[in-house]
Amino acid sequence: MAGDVVPAVVNLDLEGPRINRHVYGHFAEHLGRCIYGGFYVGEDSGIPNEGGIRLDAVEALRALDIPNLRWPGGCFADEYHWKDGIGPKADRPAMVNTHWGNVEENNHFGTHEFMALCELLGTEPYISGNVGSGTVAEMSDWVEYLTRDGDSPMVRLRKANGRDEPWRVRFWGLGNETWGCGGNMTAEHYANEARRYATYCRDHDGNRLYRIAAGASDFDYAWTEALMKQLSHLGCRRVERPLYQAVSVHYYTITGSWEHKGSSTEFGTDDYYATMARAARVDEVLTGHANVMDCYDPQREIGLVLDEWGTWWDVEPGTNPGFLYQQNTLRDALVAGVHFDIFHKHADRLVMANIAQTVNVLQAMILTDPESEALVLTPTYHVFEMNKGHQDAAGLRVDLPGRSPSKRIGDDDLATVSVSASRKDGKVLFSLSNLDAEEEAEVDLDLRGGGVGEVTARILTAGALQAHNTPERPDAVAPRPYDGVRPTGKGLRVRLPAHSFVTVEGAVA
């Protein structure tokens, strides 16, 4: 049915759950060149910086209105001991990053540097604590060091390191991937550990923690059930406040094997469609975990957090296999667009999501050149920027009453047209993707309960699915104004070229 008109009904006066801005969150791990050479270049670098933090990266990311940044991992979090990363840099002990490249980590980027980065970005920190190789006391001390006022051992240590006032740090991860690199635990064992760690991660001086239990990978619903049971059966009594406030899950878009994931830039149409089908299955993942959570938490007080997601390809030829550096094409951008439409659909349960990762690693927003000051904005960066109006907006239900175009990909039916919408501050924002590699589509937005005045539209596409940005061609895939939207008697008709992402914005009339 490629090329047919797709009807889409949107009730502008029936606002749904708020799209939490934190589903547009980010992730920065001590992995490859994400921190060193990405965010952090050191105070002696010739690249403009503040305290070693690269300012052009900060400027670019501020344009995305980043709501939160997860750090220091990932797998690295569970071998990171935070006290090694404070105090004079010359006195900080080095360590070996055994997970990512087996390289030496000098700990020059630590707690104070991360908090300075968050302040420059205007974002909230999300700290992932060490459960795998750490201790309860170690994480408890970290919370105290960052958030306590007045006088205490950790407060005195913080002040000795140059920070008098505490920071506000709401988001704390109770470990990471504890089923694997975070300790190879069983679900039941980790559920007990999560209770123990959560108990000693305390609220200090009005800093109310939002504790996130390390959850499952992909479709492991039994892991989520083990965590939810811990919250609902504490001596058969209802607790005033749960020990942890959210449960996480991880889901990556991978089409090959872990050993041979395929090239980020050299792929055919079949590989493209397999990628889109895999990406769309995040809807199944979120639905499945939410259904388990509903059995124990029908009021939906516990949040679901997808704190690692994105595409994962083979590293670029000639780069360290442990650094996970990959290019980022139009295909990756369309993966992001589909994810966000699905995130908006799950706004009643999904409270946070973090793309992996922000700079130079996996599906990055920014690529930096280690040999120059060049900084490249990826196609995925542009999807985040075009979609930022959805943050904290009221979701609007989009119904596709007719038979939408689709393709059979293996055992899956891939809908090739994806639409989401939201309303905020008197404006409505529509996001539309056409995943068909070769055929255009048209969408009739049947607007009910109101109308939309004059609209502005932008499009992200390119001549080839493999198109990507480089220092020599930084705008090969970049948004541009779009005139493929026209009014109809019932709303708007939007023409979607093949493999394109379009946003349409207008004031509600």
Image (spheres, rainbow, N blue to C red):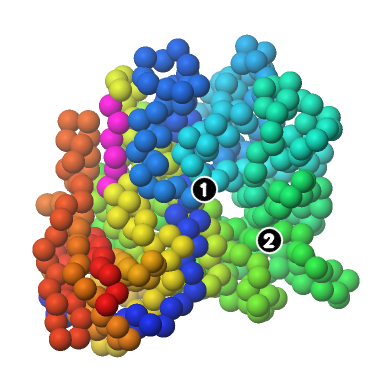
Q: Please determine whether, in this image, residue 182 is positioned above or below residue 370.
A: below
Looking at this view, is 61 or 13 the one in front?
13
Residue 104 circle label: none
The answer for how far apart the CA atoms under marks 1 and 2 are is 17 Å
Point 44% across, 47% down: residue: 66
Q: Is residue 406 above or below residue 370?
A: below
Q: Position of residue 71 (x, y in %)?
A: 57, 40
Residue 245: assigned label: 2
Report which quarter residue 83 is drawn in. Answer: top right
Q: Residue at x 53, y 72 (%)?
A: 348
Please tell me whether residue 434 belongs to the stretch shown in magenta: no
Which residues lie in the magenta part?
374-379
| Disc on the earlier residue, 1 or 2 | 1
Which residue is disc 1 drawn over?
68
Q: Residues within 10 Å of mark 1 (few under 14, many from 20)?
A: many
Q: Secondary structure at mark 1?
A: strand
Position in image of residue 1 (x %, y %)? 17, 79
**Amino acid type at image mark 1:** Asn
- Kind of residue indicated by mark 2: Gln
Q: Nearer the viewer, residue 297 or 362?
A: 297
Q: Tags 1 and 2 in contact by the CB under 8 Å rule?
A: no
Residue 95 as seen in the image, left or right of residue 414: right
Q: Residue at x 47, y 18 (%)?
A: 42
